[in-house]
Amino acid sequence: MILRKLRIFGEWESQCKMYDFRVLNRLLIVYCKMGLLDKAESLVNKAVEGRIPYASTWHVLVIGFMENKQIPRAVEMLKNALSVGRFGWMPNPATFTAFLDYLEWKGDVESNGRDDNSVKQIGSGVQGFVSETVED
């Protein structure tokens, strides 16, 4: 099944004139459900070369990594999704709540003497995201 979908996707990708990330998202969902996260991430990295992805494309990976208990990688994908700056997009509430819980936990780790600049960077992105949401 996955090989067939990958073949169809490859044919579409080689012939498409206007890239539609929604098509890629469908394949990513299958990969993530099968636990093939590295393959899914590799597809996205290839697809974004010279293109601006949808935030939802990164979000598919966020969910995949979260469901597979790879929270640090999920955080990286969420940072990518937030950086796209697509107006009106926001992660689903469950994802956002889990993300904030992770930041809180990392903050607890930080307060125990560890310094993690990526957490500060993510926190800044979340603050901007929340501010924009509240202002709307």
Image: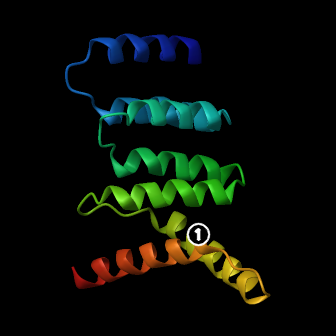
Q: Is residue 1 visible?
A: no
Position of 119 with respect to 123 (left or right) is right
What residue did someone put label 1 on?
118
Category of crowding for the residue at label 1, using alpha-carbon neighbours closer than 10 angstroms: few (below 14), some (14–19), many (at least 20): few
Q: Quadrant of residue 89?
A: bottom left
Q: Nearer the viewer, residue 131 or 109?
A: 109
In the displayed structure, would residue 84 be above or below residue 24?
A: below
Q: Nearer the viewer, residue 52 or 37?
A: 52
Position of 119 with respect to 115 (left or right) is left
Residue 25 screen position, x and y as percent = 42, 36
Q: SS at mark 1? A: helix
In the displayed structure, would residue 82 be above or below residue 127?
A: above
Residue 68 screen position, x and y as percent = 70, 49
Question: Which residue is found at the position 43% from the left and 73% from the top?
Answer: 125
Question: Which residue is found at the position 75% from the left and 80% from the top?
Answer: 114
Residue 119 screen position, x and y as percent = 59, 74
